Image: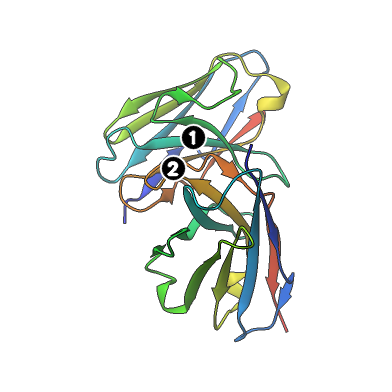
Amino acid sequence: EIVMTQSPATLSVSPGERATLSCRASQSVTSNLAWYQQKPGQAPRLLIYGASTRATGIPARFSGSGSGTEFTLTISSLQSEDFAVYYCHQYTKWWTFGQGTKVEIK
Amino acid sequence: QVQLQESGPGLVKPSETLSLSCTVSGGSISSYYWNWIRQPPGKGLEWIGSIQYTGSTNYNPSLKSRLTISVDTSKNQFSLKLSSVTAADTAVYYCATNSGYDAFHIWGQGTMVTVSS
C-alpha cells in the first residue's frame, strides 16, 4: 500500500496570506496525485488532479505542484471560504489518501 | 452533470450486514467507475472498493473478505454490502465516480452509518 503523509496536521493562517500544504508518498506516484477540500458536514470537493490541473470551477488561487513523492498545494491568498481540511490522494496503485491538513484562521 | 445519492439504513447491529445503494442521475452508469469511500467520525478517508458497469470490481484488500459491490444498470444504481460489521465500521459512507486510475471527480453527499446494538 502507498502511504500518503501530509504536513503539517494543522496550519494557522491569516486571511489574505499564503498557505502551503505538503504531501509525501511512500513511493513514487508519478503525477497521479489529487487534492480535495472538505468542509464540516460536506463531501470532499476535488481541487487538483494530475498533481497540477485545477478541476472545473476551482479558483486560480489554488495551485498544485510536484511529482514522484513530493507534492505541494498552495493557496495564494486565503479567503474566508478556504478554511477547511485538505486531503491529498494518490491513484497510481489502488487509491489511498493522506490524513489531512486542517487550515484554520490565525 | 452526473449526481450521486446514497441511501440505506443509518443504524446497523454488530455482526450484521451493512447495505447501501448509490443512485446515479444525470448520466449513465454504463460509463466510468463507481466507488465507495468511507470516513469514520473525525478521521480521514478510506477507499472501500469500485465497480464498472460490466461488473468488474476492485476491493480494498483490508475489507475484501467482507465486501460485495454490485451494479444494477436497469436502475442506474450500484450497491455496497459489508458483512460482519463492528463499531469500527461506523462512518460516513460516500459514493464517488472516476475513470479508473483517476481522481474522484464527483461525490455523493454521504450517508452516516452507525454500528450499534
Q: Chain of mark 1?
A: A
Residue A62: image location, x then y, percent = 54, 20
Mark 1 and mark 2 residues within 8 Å of each other at the beta carbon = yes
Point out the image quarter for the C terminus of chain B. bottom right
**In the rendered image, the vertical position of residue A51 relative to residue B93, given as above or below:** above
Mark pair 1, 2: CA separation: 6 Å
Give residue B4's position: percent from left, percent from top. Answer: 65, 50
Query: Is residue A39 shown left or right of residue B63?
Result: right
Residue ID at (25%, 40%): A28
The reply to whether residue B41 is in sight is no
Q: In this orientation, which residue lies closer to the viewer: B63 or B99? A: B99
Please name the residue shown 72% across and 22% down the image: A80
Q: Quadrant of the N terminus of chain B?
A: top right
Q: Chain of mark 2?
A: A
Q: Who is closer to the viewer here, B62 or B31? A: B31
The residue at 52%/43% (across/down) is A100
Amino acid beneath label 2 = His
**Is the residue A93 above or below the residue B20 in the image?**
above
| Sooner in the amino-acid sequence: mark 1 or mark 2 | 1
Q: Does A4 sit left or right of B70 as displayed?
A: left
* Location of residue A30 by image quarter: top left
**Residue with the mark numbered 2:** A89
- Residue A88: x %, y % from top left: 46, 39
Residue drawn at point x = 37 percent, y = 68 percent: B61
Q: Is residue B88 visible?
A: yes
Q: Which mark is residue B45?
A: none
Tell me the residue that label 1 is attached to.
A35
Question: Could you confirm whether marks 1 and 2 are on the same chain?
Answer: yes
| Colour option used | rainbow
